[in-house]
Image (tube, coloured by chain):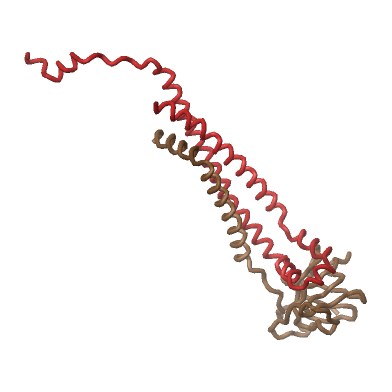
Amino acid sequence: MTDRLIRGWGWVGVHRFLVGWAVAMLGLVAFSGGIAFGAARETAPSPALRPGPVETVARVQSTAVEAVVIGRRPNGWVVRTRTDELLIVRTSDATTYRLKNKPADANAVRRGAKVLILGRPAPREGVMIARVIAVRGQIRNPVAPPEAIGLPR
Amino acid sequence: MDDEHDDLDLLFARAAPPAPATDFGPQARVRLRAIRGARRLTLLALVDLIALALLPLLAFLIGAEVAASDAWSLLRLAFEDRALAIGARDEIVRALVLAVPWRFVLLASLNALFLLALTSYLLRATDAVDAMRMRTAR
């Protein structure tokens, strides 16, 4: 047993470049495979419209949020994030809109539209000030009116 | 031939007694060092394997956390809509930086560095075991 161990390490010593490359390749495959597997297992819930009332407001820290538009307000939109939280999106004249990767106007944003909002979180919790709203699609679920899902006016 | 000694006994009696090896002591010490070295390297190789096994686990956590964020959608948008990516690059970069699970990235980096250092040491240390093996084989 001990002789085999010594012979084995002797072999590793002779083929050290091969062993080094093998370990490096194994590490690389393990790392990229782990990332891919983790990303595949964690299927992020797509923002969707649900009939129940919205109970929590989104604590936005990021400058980008993917969400579904569930209602229009005089100075913006009410959206539901993928974590099923409510977010009020404030818009201004400086806000730009994108539809199918081209410039659009505010009419491109409709209830049920899947949007990616770029901007900054407002000091008030649950509010985001939008700089760009990119429409990324339309969800198929029937869209309930905002009042029916307990949205604040 | 008498009854008490057969041919084999006579043959042994005629043969010269084996001379004890002059360098028995040093050879034994070299072999002992080779055994100790091989055992130590095996233990270190086990630690190396544990570090190697931790790498995909940490990568899994990084992948899962990034996938749970809006980072994939944002990256897709940035690739598809170049004009937007240029115009809103500050927001995009900041959102991507915030989406990265830095604690797992740090752990994975430390693990990879440890793996690199230990593997390099192991491969260099095999020289000593191999040299001792060659000396005891002579």
Relative image position of residue B83 (x, y in whole percent): 81, 72
Q: Nearer the viewer, residue A73 or B23?
A: B23
Can residue B126 be seen from the camera position used here? yes
Task: Name which residue lies at 73% across and 85% down.
Answer: A143
Residue at screen point 71% across, 81% down: A139
Q: Is residue A108 above or below residue B107?
A: below
Name the residue located 84 percent from the left edge and 63 percent from the top edge: B90
Residue B117 lies left or right of residue B91; in this view the side is left
The chain whose colour is red is: B
Chain A is which colour? brown
Q: Is residue A78 above or below residue B49?
A: below
Count of numbered circles in the view:
0
Taking depth in this image into account, of B25 and B43 the one nearest to the observer is B25
Residue A110 in percent (x, y) is at 79, 83
Which residue lies most toward the right here?
A93
Across and down, in percent, residue A147 comes to: 80, 83
Residue A100 appears in which quarter of the rendering? bottom right
Where is residue A120 shown, x and y percent of the image?
Answer: 85, 66
In this rendering, position of residue B60 left or right of residue B85: left
